[in-house]
Structure formats: structure tokens, C-alpha cells
Image: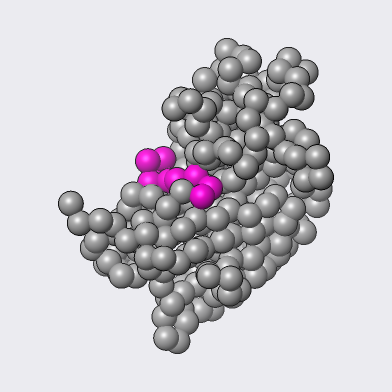
């Protein structure tokens, strides 16, 4: 199924997609039909299997009318894996240490599908990074690869928008990865049963319709199971935690000349079979 967080009548809620493209897709408001305040809470209660039977298949809002929020609005942790495709290691001249490169994002730096990605006043170097986001379904510490799938609720799409000059001021990535409204997350989480082969997901990033990045998930240097094992070694993973698994080669900063995003651009990240995350780019207004 496809699960999403969205606004309804000005309030945050969550639900799942029903219908099809031919008959018209809609969203059931599972937040209104349950005691759970967020998708994270429903995942933590292991309720995603039961909620559709409880809430039914009659849409409360048309999918076309949904105001999307980040798929998980209140994650306890957002961990990002850097330099996790060989082509990206080669274009940056970094990585290859044998362990995943981990940095963090904060939830309030994110925005949902269709919401503006903001180029901050301080920089003209806002770059795109299309990625696959893993959403933790079951808590775990020191997770073994053989049990990794049991700890995955599903996958979504991420655009790890990076303010490159701030990212490169020191060896630490955090400042350049946490400007407001630079982390696109959505449009929904797709559960494993619909995704099928986790090694066959295809990621494509398009800037104003032009393909900038393309790769398949089997090209990850550190695969999903290894990432879960590594991250759960130093921290207990909790339901709703988000792990952003890395971007392919083709980022704007590595191009000659560099290609950065600016006001009026449209950035899209498609992951087959999940869907497409789309965000218009705007320049931050001077207050």
C-alpha cells in the first residue's frame, strides 16, 4: 500500500491511497478513523495491516487535492548515508572507507511533495540529491542482515537538497544539509509487498525535465541490510525512523560548469515503482 501524511482542514493527518488511475485515486483519512495522531504512531503500533479493514476503502479526499506533508512528520531520527554509489564517490573524490558515511538531518528542514524547495539567502549553491528513503517499521538494536527486512516498514523518495558551500566549510556535512525547506520527502511510503525486488528500484532525478541522475538500487555500495546493521550498532532504531540511503552520480556540483537550482526551477525525483517526488524551487524572500 501507499501511506502518506497530509493536511486536511488545516490539521495534520495520515492515510492510504485507494482506487486507481482509471477510476480516480483518493485517500482514506486513517487519522480521523483511528486513535493514531501520525503515521509514525501507526507504524509503531504495527497497525498498518489492520487500519484498512477498520477505515474502509471509501476516499475522504481526492489524491489530486491532497496537500502533502513529509511522509513521516515526526521521526525521532533522520540518518543519511553519504557517498553510497560508486559513481558519486568518483565524482567527489571521497568515500570508499569500507563503512557507511552517516550524517543527520532534522525534521523541520523537510517539506512534502509539491511544496517549495527554498534556496536560502546565504547561498546560490543549492544542489539536488535524489535518494531512496528507508522507513523503519520495527525497533531494533544490532540488527542482523538476515532479519533486516523484518525491520522495514517501507520506502519513500527523498531529495537531500544540499547547500554546497555550507556543506564544504568544514569536514562535517550538517550545516549544508539542514537549511529550512531543503529536504523533500514523499510523496508517500510504499510497503514492501508492492515494491517487490528491493534491488531493482530505479532512481531518476530530473531538473526542468532534463535527466541529471539515474541508477538502480543494486548499485548501492552499502545495501539496505548493511545500512540497517551498521546504524543499529550505535543506536537503537525506532519505528518511523528514516534512513536516507545515498545519491547516485550526477549531482550539480560535480558538473562542468556546476548546475545548481534556483528560483523558478522544478526538481523531480522518480523512484520506480514508488512514484515521483516533485518540488518547485523558490528563492528565499528577503524579510
Q: Answer above or below: position of 238 versus 81.
A: above
Residue 107 shown in magenta: yes
| Residue at the image point whose x is 34% and y is 70% from the top | 125
Residue 49 found in image quarter: top right
Residue 43 shows in the view: no
Q: Position of residue 117 (x, y in %)?
A: 41, 55
As rendered, which of 131 and 218 lies closer to the eye? 131
Q: Residue extending furthest top?
A: 35
Residue 126 screen position, x and y as percent: 37, 66
Q: Is residue 183 magenta?
A: no
Quarter of the image with the N terminus is: top right
- At x 58%, y 39%, the residue is 65
Q: Residue at x 78, y 36 (%)?
A: 19
Q: Nearer the viewer, residue 19 or 202?
A: 19
Q: Position of residue 246 (x, y in %)?
A: 55, 59
Q: Tell me which segment is drawn in magenta.
A: 106-114
Amino acid at each position: 500500500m501507499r501511506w502518506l501524511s497530509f493536511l486536511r482542514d488545516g490539521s495534520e493527518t495520515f492515510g492510504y491511497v485507494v482506487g486507481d488511475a482509471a477510476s480516480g485515486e483518493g485517500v482514506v483519512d486513517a487519522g480521523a478513523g483511528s486513535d493514531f495522531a501520525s503515521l509514525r504512531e501507526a507504524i509503531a503500533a504495527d497497525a498498518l495491516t489492520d487500519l484498512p479493514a477498520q477505515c474502509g476503502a471509501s476516499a475522504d479526499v481526492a489524491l489530486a487535492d491532497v496537500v502533502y506533508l513529509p511522509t513521516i512528520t515526526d521521526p525521532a531520527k533522520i540518518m543519511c548515508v553519504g557517498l553510497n554509489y560508486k559513481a558519486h564517490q568518483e565524482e567527489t573524490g571521497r568515500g570508499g572507507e569500507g563503512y557507511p558515511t552517516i550524517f543527520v538531518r532534522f525534521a523541520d528542514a523537510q517539506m512534502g511533495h509539491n511544496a517549495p524547495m527554498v534556496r536560502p539567502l546565504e547561498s546560490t549553491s543549492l544542489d539536488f540529491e535524489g535518494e531512496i528513503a528507508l522507513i523503519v517499521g520495527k525497533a531494533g538494536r544490532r540488527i542482523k542482515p538476515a532479519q533486516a527486512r523484518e525491520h522495514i516498514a517501507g520506502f519513500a523518495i527523498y531529495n537531500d537538497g544540499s547547500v554546497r558551500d555550507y556543506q564544504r566549510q568544514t569536514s562535517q556535512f550538517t550545516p549544508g544539509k539542514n537549511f529550512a525547506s531543503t529536504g523533500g520527502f514523499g510523496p508517500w511510503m510504499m510497503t514492501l509487498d508492492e515494491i517487490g525486488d528491493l534491488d531493482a528500484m530505479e532512481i531518476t532525478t530530473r531538473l526542468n525535465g532534463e535527466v541529471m541522475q539515474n541508477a538502480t538500487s543494486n548499485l548501492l555500495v552499502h545495501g539496505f541490510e548493511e545500512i540497517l546493521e551498521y546504524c543499529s550498532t550505535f543506536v537503537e532504531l525506532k519505528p518511523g525512523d528514516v534512513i536516507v540511503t545515498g545519491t547516485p552520480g550526477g549531482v550539480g556540483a560535480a558538473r562542468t560548469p556546476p548546475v545548481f537550482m534556483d528560483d523558478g526551477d522544478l526538481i523531480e525525483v522518480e523512484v520506480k515503482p514508488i512514484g515521483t517526488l516533485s518540488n518547485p524551487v523558490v528563492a528565499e524572500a528577503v524579510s
